[in-house]
Amino acid sequence: MVGIGRCASVGALLVALAVLAPAVTATCDDELPTQLVGNYSGLACTPVWNTFVLRYAQGKDNVLRVVLSTMYSTGWVGMGFSKNGLMVGSSAMVGWMGKTGVAHIKQFQLQGKTPSQVVVDKGSLVSNDHDHTVLVQQAKIYLAFQLRFTQPLKSQSVLLAFGSAIPVNDRLSEHQDKTAIVFDFTTGSSSSASSFPEGLKRTHGALNLFAWGVLLPIGAIVARYCRRWDPLWFYLHTGIQFVGFILGLAGIVAGVSLYNKIQANVPAHRGLGIFVLVLGILQLIEMLRTMHIPDELSRSPPGACSRALLGLPTAAISTGIEHCKRVPGGDAVSTADSLRPNKDSKYRKFWNWYHHWVGRLALFFAAVNIVLGIKVGAAGNSWKIGYGFNLAILLITIITLEVLLWTRWRNNSSSTPGPGY
């Protein structure tokens, strides 16, 4: 029993030490290594994250002296400076001890989220290489460097990260952990950086991918391949396209808000987005002008309009009655409020060409812009694989239905290739 009690006491002590270790090590009580005292004395000090401790001072010449320390065994440690709290677009000072014991500290420009997009010896930070030092002492690594800014730093988005693998050929492995904080270099206070830009970017991408990449293509598929179910296909088509456009518009609004927040330099992505939006608005305007007048009424001859009401859904009957009062017959257009000619009009094929090709152009450029957005937003492999799978399913479905459609047209000599609604 005594042995068991001793084991329990030792176990409790080890647990307590494990819990308290980060709190003990992440303090400013430790003195700087003597090698750093000459150039980095008189620094303010504050713990910032886990075992990371930040020592800093700003001079009158706008030179920021920094010593970043943390517990270390192997791998790399970095401190980045960001304009918007995002990793992509930031510049970072990264230090590590090589396998042969040689210290390294270099600037990296974070152009994306993959190792190949983290470029060494590039970035927006102005410094002199001889002012940089990396030391490892008592299981701690110290990154000491000096940066020159155009004006004194106040509130600044700072990125902290570390990786467990030693860089090979100056290529950083993926970080093991990271955080983003907003640090005030005038007061020494820090707070967690808002996830607003990153969350807004995901919202912008998800809404537009679902709207322009899923719903709207499905609506177009319904219009081309489901016309035997008249008038159900028409209401499905207009309903799906309307919902898809509204979600796409919400995604574009999120994109505008994101641009105003981070001032991203993505002219091609923005330009394509505006072009697709204009095409979508043209389609929506015509859809809203025609969706309440089915072709069953628009092509009804005088005296037969009222009989055509019997085949309409209940929700469309009241609108149909008003249409029968306004349009006694004829074949010029389906209604005075619409640009769509009825099916018997010689102008109908031109309207079909316009409506179909504007829609196809919108969907094609939307797909291109989704791919471009995934790239410029550095969304990662999960977005690429997900959208690629979705695109493959759509293409296989369209090819299969198109083959079946042309087969049916060939077997039915009275059918004319080319959908028209």
Image: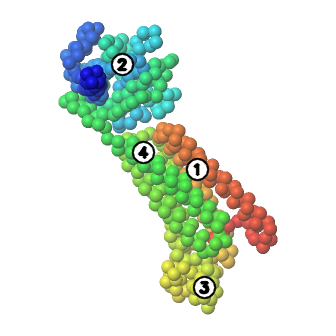
Q: Is residue 399 above or below residue 96?
A: below
Q: Earlier in the sequence, mark 3 or mark 4?
A: 4
Secondary element at image label 1? helix
Q: Which residue is mark 2?
A: 72
Q: Which residue is mark 4?
A: 201
Secondary element at image label 3? helix
Q: CA distance from mark 4 to mark 1?
A: 20 Å
Q: Quadrant of the C terminus?
A: bottom right
Mark 2 is on which residue type? Tyr
Neighbor class of circle 1 (other Cα within 10 Å; few <14, some 14-19, many 20+) is: some
Q: Which residue is mark 3?
A: 308
**Nearest to the observer: residue 315 or residue 75:** 75
Q: Earlier in the sequence, mark 2 or mark 3?
A: 2
**Nearest to the observer: residue 154 or residue 268:** 154
Q: Residue at x 57, y 81 (%)?
A: 312
Which labelled disc corresponds to residue 390?
1
Q: Earlier in the sequence, mark 1 or mark 2?
A: 2
Of circles 1 and 3, which is in front?
1
Mark 4 is on which residue type? Lys
Q: CA distance from mark 2 to mark 4?
A: 34 Å
Of circles 2 and 3, which is in front?
2
Mark 1 is on which residue type? Asn
Q: Earlier in the sequence, mark 4 or mark 1?
A: 4
**Nearest to the observer: residue 31 or residue 307:** 31
